[in-house]
Image (spheres, rainbow, N blue to C red):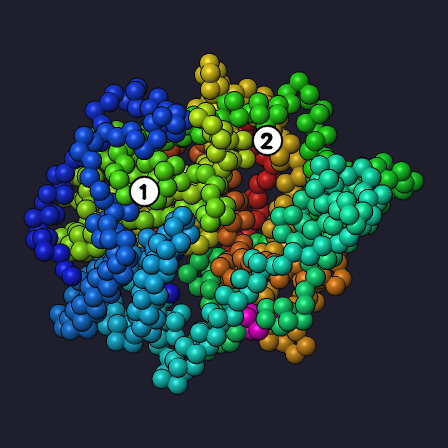
Amino acid sequence: MLILKSCFKNTAKYNGLYWFSRCLTARRFVTSLRPSNEDQLIRDVFDQKCYGNNYKFAKKIEQVGLFKNRFLLDKDQGFIRLAEIASMNCKKLIEEILNDDSNNTLNIIRCFDRISNLLCSVIDLLEFVRCSHPNTETILKAEEAYNLLFELMNILNTHQGLYNKLRESVSLSPALAKLDSEAYNVAKVFLQDFEKSGVNLNDSLRKKFVKQSMESSTLGRRFFNQSMNKPQRYISVPLEVLGGSDPYFVSCVFDEKQKLAKIPTVGYEGAQALVSIANPEVRKQIYIQGHYGTEHDLSLFESYMDSKNKLAKIVGKDSFAELQLLDKMAQSPNCVINFLENLSKKNLPNVRKIHSVFSRMKQKELGLTTQPEINIWDREYYVTRYKQQLFQEKSFLTSSVAYQRNYLTVGTVIQGLSRLFNSLYGLRFVPAEVMPGEIWDPDVRKLNVLDEKNHLIGTIYFDLFIRPGKTDGAAHFTIRSSRELDRFSINDSLSLGFDDYVSEKNQKTAYQIPIISLLCNFQKSNDNNASYLDLWDVKTLFHEMGHAMHSILGRTKYQNLAGTRCATDFVELPSIIMEHFMASSEVLPLYARHYQDDKPFPSQILGHYNQVEDSCVALDLQSQICMSMIDQVFHSDTVSDPGYSSNDVVHQISNRFSGFESVPKTSWHLQFSHLYGYSATYYSYLFDTALASLVFRKLFSKNPLSREAGEKFRNTILKWGGSRNPWECIAEALEDPIYAEGGEKAMQRIGNNAFNMSERKS
C-alpha cells in the first residue's frame, strides 16, 4: 500500500493556532508521587489485584471512549464516524494537493503525510480492535469502518494525479535531499509505493495491474486462512507401540473403547506428539500425515505464487522478490541469497555435531549396534531430551518452572524494565489513571513513560493475559505515532477525537505523545495472588518492549517515518537486542527478584538456562535459513518455469539447507503462513538477529547498563525511525564506515562476521 505502507502495523471547530500554543506548554503530571514510590507502585499495580482499575489518580471520574477517543463513546456509530471524518479530511487534502500551483514542495509533502496520518490514526486503531477486543459486536463495527477506508485506500494507491503532482514537485526541488533529507526520504517512500502499485503505467497496463493485484490478494488470503486453519488429522496406533512415551500425553490420546491411541498430527497438538512419542516409526507417521498436502492445496499455493510473479512482471521487474526488496536494506534477492548461503556454510558443521550427539542418544535408546540417522521427525524429540539431560548434569543449579516464577511476577519484570530504561535512556514508567471506557478489558494496565525532566513522552497499555477470542502470540500496536506536531496535524488529531498532549524537545519543536498497546498471552493466576512468568515469557515481554521503545523514541517530522515505520529488515533490531539484555547477568537483578524477600534470582541459574536453551540453537538457525531461502525461491521467476512444482522446490532446498533429508510425499510449505505476510522478506528476522548480536557486542558487552552506550544506541538507531538510511545507522553504531553504503558488500560482511548464535553474556 502506498499511503498506508506503515499502517497495520467534520473539521475541528477549534482554532489550530490556539491549540498548538496550548499544547506546546501543556504539562500533564499524572502523579505527584516521588520516583522511589513510583518504582514500587509499578510492581503493586500489576501484582496486587486490589489495585486493578479501581486505582485512580484522578479525583474526577468521567466516561470516555476507547483510548480516550471522544467518538468512541458512541459504541454504535463511533468507528464509522471516525472512518467518515478521516475519509472526508483526506479528500479535502487531495483537492488541496491537486489544486496547488505554488510548486511548494514541502507543503505538498506535508499534505501527503497528513493523509497518511489521518488514515493510519484510524486504521491502526481498527486493526488493533479487530485483533484484541473481547466484544464481537465491537469487532464487527471496526470491520465495517475498516472496509469503508479500504475503498479509499484503493483509490489513493492508483491515483495518477497525486503521483504526478508529487513526482513533479520533487523534481523541481533538486536540492531537497541536502536541504531537508527527511522530507526527501518520505517523498521517496511515497513515490516508491506509488510505483509498486503500478500508478506510472499506461491505462491498459494499469488496469491489468489492478486486476492482477485483486486476484493475488484474494489468493493470498485464501492461502493464509488455509495454512492457519488446517483441519486436524489423526493416526491410530495400538497402545503397545507407545512404550517409553510421555505417559500424560498417552493418557490424553488413548481411547478406552477402541483400545487405540488416536494421535493428532497437525498444529500445536501434532508438535506435542512429536515431542512425546518415543517410537520413531510412529513419529514418522505423525510427521508425514501432518505435512501431507492435497492436490487442491498445492494448486492454490502455486497459483498464489504465480500471481505475485505476474504482478511484478507488469511493473517491469523480473520477480516479486526484486520488487519487494527495492526499499529494503538488502536491496536485491542476490544479496539475500548470498547472505543466507554464507551463513549456512558456517552453521552446517554445528548442525552435524548436534546430529552426532542425537544419533548416539537414539542408538542407546533403541539398543542398536550402529549409530542411526537422525530424521526430521526425530528433531524435537531429541532436542527436548538433550536439554533435559543438560539440566540434570548440573542438578544443583536445576530449578523448576515454579521456582523461577517465585522471582518473576509480572509486576517485578515490568518494574525491572523501567529500571533498565532508566539506566540506558533516563526514562521511567509511572502508573497512570484509567478512566471508565478507556480500556477494553479489566486486566489492562496503563503506564506513562516520563523522561528525566518529568516530561510525558509516551503511553503504554499492557494487555498481557490470555482470554477467549484474543489473537494468538504477542504483538505490539502503535495506536498513535511519535511524530512532530504543527497546527495542521493538531487540527487533524482533534478532528478525529484525539486530545493531543505533547512533550518538548526544545521550545520550537513539539511531538505527539505516542500511544502503544502491547499484547501477550500469559497465564493469569486463578486467585488474588500475583501472576507469574517463566523465563520464556520474560523473553517475549522484553522483545515486545523493544518495539515499544522504538515507537516512543523514534521521533520524526513525518508520521510515515516515525518509530517502527522503517524497512522491514531493520524493524526487528531494537526488539531482538532486548533479548540480549534479558539474558545478561548484569540486567537480571533488575527484573527477577523474589516476591517475598526481594532477593535477586541466582545468576548461575540464568547462565545455565542460557546454555541449555542455546545448546541446539544451530538447528533453529538452519531451519530459519532454509525457510528464508524457500521464501526467496518462491518469489523468484522460478515459479513460471515449465513443469514447476512447489514440492520439488521444497525438497531440493530442504536437502541442501535444512540439515535433514527431505521427506517424500510431504508439503510442509503449505503451513508456512509467513509466505503471505512476509513475502520475500522472511529473512528479516534472521538478518536483524545478526545485526543485534553485532550491535550488542559493540555497545553493551562490557556494561549492559551503560548510560553512554544506551544514549549511543538511542541516537544511532532508535531516534531515526525510518527517516534515515538504516545502513548509515548501523555504520555509526558499529563505528565502521564500510557498512554505510549497504548492498552486497555490507551483507557479505555481516555474513562473514556472523556471530555464534549461542554466544551470550551471562
Magenta span contains residue 305: yes
Find residue 268 and report its horizontal and vertical position in percent: 62, 48
Depth check: give the residue in front, 454 or 637.
Answer: 454
Circles 2, 1 touching at the beta carbon (< 8 Å): no
Instruction: Name the residue beneath numbered marker 1.
Output: 439
User: What distance separates the C-alpha of mark 2 from that of mark 1?
Assistant: 37 Å
Q: Secondary structure at mark 1?
A: loop
Nearer the N terminus, badge 2 or badge 1? 1
Q: Is 227 left, or right, of 466 in this rendering?
A: right
Q: Badge 1 local density, few (<14 within 10 Å), some, or many (20+)?
A: many
Q: Is 685 left, or right, of 234 in this rendering?
A: left
Task: Name, please, the residue furthest toward the right.
Answer: 369
Q: Which segment did they paint magenta?
A: 302-306
Residue 157 vertical position relative to residue 348 in the rendered view, above or below: below
Instruction: Name the residue beneath numbered marker 2.
Output: 610
Labelled disc at residue 162: none
Q: Main secondary structure of the magenta part?
A: helix
Residue 356 visible in the displayed image? no
Depth check: give the residue in front, 390 or 683.
Answer: 390
The residue shown at (69%, 33%) is: 387
The residue shown at (37%, 65%) is: 1
Q: Nearer the viewer, mark 2 or mark 1?
A: 1
Magenta span contains residue 304: yes
Find residue 516 and report its horizontal and vertical position in percent: 34, 44
Find residue 97 and report its horizontal and vertical position in percent: 19, 69
